[in-house]
């Protein structure tokens, strides 16, 4: 037997769990059942792909075994199981990106910690809210030796080989005493367990057995009529598919009939995961075929810029053995994807102002990527964007509002890109626009540099950088006044190493000079970005 230490971050998260910052303790069961259900899905898929695998898949299920005398509850599944190495890496460490960031935030604000930890979703560790000791025995499908893991949640765990472990995973919780004040129910009581399963896990596709009988109805939520599904049921289902602990911002439930039938149940989360902008961010929704789970993160169904959308698509007419490669090429899947994208975009458009503000703060940057990735929906996406502008530093504006507000005589939409609002506001480029009372959009996201190069107008009105090319503010002299000729010639030759041309400008009011790019030049920020990428 070996005794190992938890990774420092894991230990801190477990301490937070144990000292129960999350008031609803019942949800530990949802997390364990959710893990069991995932493990059964994985076993099914694995045995399809690998027909030599020596596994019994005749009766896949989750079992709850309470023992009132021993004060334990065991949650068992006969799913894929874990190897010893997997137990150490999956259960002993939290490798998710953003853990350090989360912990820093948790330390800063104790009042919000329940909220924050919910956002992170510490599935398995939630067992320590209700148990003072947790034992996990597991055997990976196809392997002969099993592994036993045990911890009191105090910094170390033990790990050991076991010879006679059944295939799958059993998690035994040594329960803390029930305490109504602390919302710790008696989790060795079958009636309590039954009501928790009904509330949080009813839709799970595998049987969840208690005393030999299935407690859950196993009805696929997406296949039920919308009018019969409650907001709580949607919310619990969302938490299962997304591994998020917070309620979704919006639910999209659709049914398509005709040549290619499918049900889709999609969600806009209310919070961005920490890794939304990292390379290995999860992407896509789950694909089912006739109620059977086929794959997670089906990227053929949603484009990358909508990677925050979670949920399920259940198609009636696909092969159970369909591969990711085939899906990418499938014309019908492409049609489904187009339709889902339209539906998601129109849902965003119809969000209430409060919900839209939340959405924008969390996912706005990702949505802007759609301007580049999804040319077909550019016009629609442009109408969903919000920008800071020089008009009111406190408020965001849409392009439509900008256009409607602009003074008579202003024929273009002006913007300036930069690293921060402060840099942009101090830019001499803005002077003449400010003097004229023209509003300028303040674009500070890295992705702004890229899309402004590709999108030249909105609703027929040119989009123009105030830092590039000639600007016509209606006050330019027709030709260079003679008294400046000599000066400009002298300056052009003096600076010929550094600049292409020196000309008189109408864009300045207080500053004597500024450097501008040619209309088709890269902006300084883009130049920097390309240089950083080694191009
Ligand atoms: P999440 O489910 O969000 O990944 P958890 O903390 O619930 O986070 O679980 C961590 C990982 O441990 C899972 O992703 C899975 O790989 C593994 N795991 C947990 N429970 C089981 C189980 N019953 N069977 C197989 N693997 C499991
Ligand atoms: Mg989990």
Image: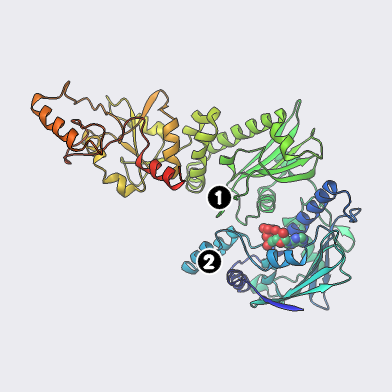
Residue furthest to the left in view is 483
Q: Position of residue 338 (x, y in %)?
A: 63, 31
Q: Quadrant of the N terminus?
A: bottom right
The reply to whether residue 31 is visible in this rendering is: no
Residues under numbered marks 2 and 1 in contact, where contact means CB atoms less than 8 Å apart: no
Position of residue 409 relative to residue 465, above or below, is above
User: Residue 238 versus residue 337: which sits nearer the camera?
Assistant: 337
Residue 515 sits in quarter: top left
Q: Quadrant of the C terminus?
A: top left
Instruction: Name the element at disc 2.
Output: helix
User: Residue 23 versus residue 284: which sits nearer the camera?
Assistant: 284
| Residue positioned 58% across, 63% down in the render | 117
Lateral position of residue 515 relative to residue 128, left or right:
left
Instruction: Name the element at disc 1.
Output: loop
The reply to whether residue 66 is visible in this rendering is: yes
User: Residue 218 versus residue 420: which sits nearer the camera?
Assistant: 420
Q: Position of residue 7 (x, y in %)?
A: 61, 71
Q: Is mark 2 within 8 Å of ligand 1?
A: no
Circle 1 Cα neighbour tier, 10 Å, few/some/many (<14 / 14–19 / ≥20): some
Position of residue 278 relative to residue 258, above or below, is below
Lateral position of residue 408 relative to residue 78, left or right:
left
| Residue positioned 90% across, 54% down in the render | 59
Q: Position of residue 423 (x, y in %)?
A: 30, 48
Q: Which mark is residue 103?
A: 2
| Residue positioned 48% across, 45% down in the render | 354
Q: Which mark is residue 533?
A: none
Question: Disc 2 to disc 1, how far (Cα)?
Answer: 18 Å
Lateral position of residue 342 relative to residue 525, left or right:
right
Lateral position of residue 451 relative to residue 296, left or right:
left
Q: Which mark is residue 276?
A: 1
Q: Position of residue 325 (x, y in %)?
A: 72, 37
Which badge, 2 or 1, comes first in the chain's sequence? 2
């Amino acid at each position: 037997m070996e005794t190992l230490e938890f990774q420092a971050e894991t230990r801190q998260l477990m301490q937070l769990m144990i000292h129960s910052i999350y008031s609803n303790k019942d949800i530990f069961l949802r997390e364990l059942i959710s893990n069991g259900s995932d493990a059964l899905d994985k076993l099914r898929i694995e045995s399809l792909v690998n027909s030599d695998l020596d596994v019994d898949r005749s009766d896949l299920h989750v079992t709850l075994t309470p023992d009132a005398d021993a004060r334990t509850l065991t949650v068992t599944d006969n799913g894929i199981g874990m190897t010893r190495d997997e137990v150490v890496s999956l259960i002993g460490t939290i490798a998710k990106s953003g853990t350090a960031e989360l912990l820093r935030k948790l330390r800063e604000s104790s009042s919000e910690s329940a909220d924050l930890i919910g956002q992170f979703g510490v599935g398995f560790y939630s067992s320590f809210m209700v148990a003072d000791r947790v034992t996990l025995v597991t055997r990976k499908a196809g392997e002969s030796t099993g592994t036993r893991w045990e911890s009191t949640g105090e910094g170390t765990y033990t790990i050991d080989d076991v010879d006679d472990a059944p295939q799958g995973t059993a998690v035994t919780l040594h329960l803390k005493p029930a305490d109504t004040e602390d919302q710790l129910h008696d989790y060795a009581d079958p009636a309590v367990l039954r009501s928790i399963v009904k509330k949080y896990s009813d839709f799970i596709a595998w049987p969840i057995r208690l005393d030999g009988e299935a407690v859950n109805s196993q009805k696929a939520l997406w296949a039920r009529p919308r009018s019969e599904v409650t907001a709580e049921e949607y919310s619990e289902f969302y938490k299962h598919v997304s591994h998020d602990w917070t309620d979704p911002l919006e639910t999209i439930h659709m049914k398509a009939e005709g040549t290619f039938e499918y049900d889709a149940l999609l969600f806009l989360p209310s919070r961005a995961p920490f890794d939304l902008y990292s390379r290995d961010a999860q992407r896509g929704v789950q694909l089912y075929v006739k109620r059977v789970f086929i794959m997670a993160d089906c990227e053929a169904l949603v484009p990358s810029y909508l990677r925050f959308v979670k949920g399920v698509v259940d198609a009636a007419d696909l092969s159970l053995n369909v591969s990711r490669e085939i899906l990418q090429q499938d014309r019908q899947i492409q049609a489904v994807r187009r339709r889902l994208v339209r539906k998601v975009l129109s849902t965003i458009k119809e969000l209430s102002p409060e919900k839209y503000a939340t959405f924008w703060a969390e996912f706005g940057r990702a949505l802007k990527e759609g301007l580049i990735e999804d040319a077909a929906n550019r016009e629609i996406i442009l109408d969903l964007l919000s920008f800071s502008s020089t008009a009111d530093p406190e408020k965001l504006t849409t392009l439509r509002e900008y256009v409607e507000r602009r003074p008579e005589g202003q024929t273009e939409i002006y913007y300036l890109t930069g690293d921060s609002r402060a840099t942009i506001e101090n830019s001499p480029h803005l002077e003449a626009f400010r003097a004229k009372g023209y509003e300028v959009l303040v674009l500070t996201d890295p992705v702004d540099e890229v899309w402004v190069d590709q999108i030249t107008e909105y609703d027929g009105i040119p989009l123009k950088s105030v830092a590039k090319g000639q600007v016509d503010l209606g006050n330019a002299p027709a030709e260079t006044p003679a008294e400046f000729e000599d000066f400009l010639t002298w300056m052009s030759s003096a600076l010929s190493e550094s600049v292409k041309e020196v000309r008189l400008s109408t864009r300045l009011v207080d500053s004597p000079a500024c450097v501008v790019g040619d209309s088709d030049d890269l902006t300084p920020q883009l130049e920097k970005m390309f240089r950083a990428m080694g191009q």
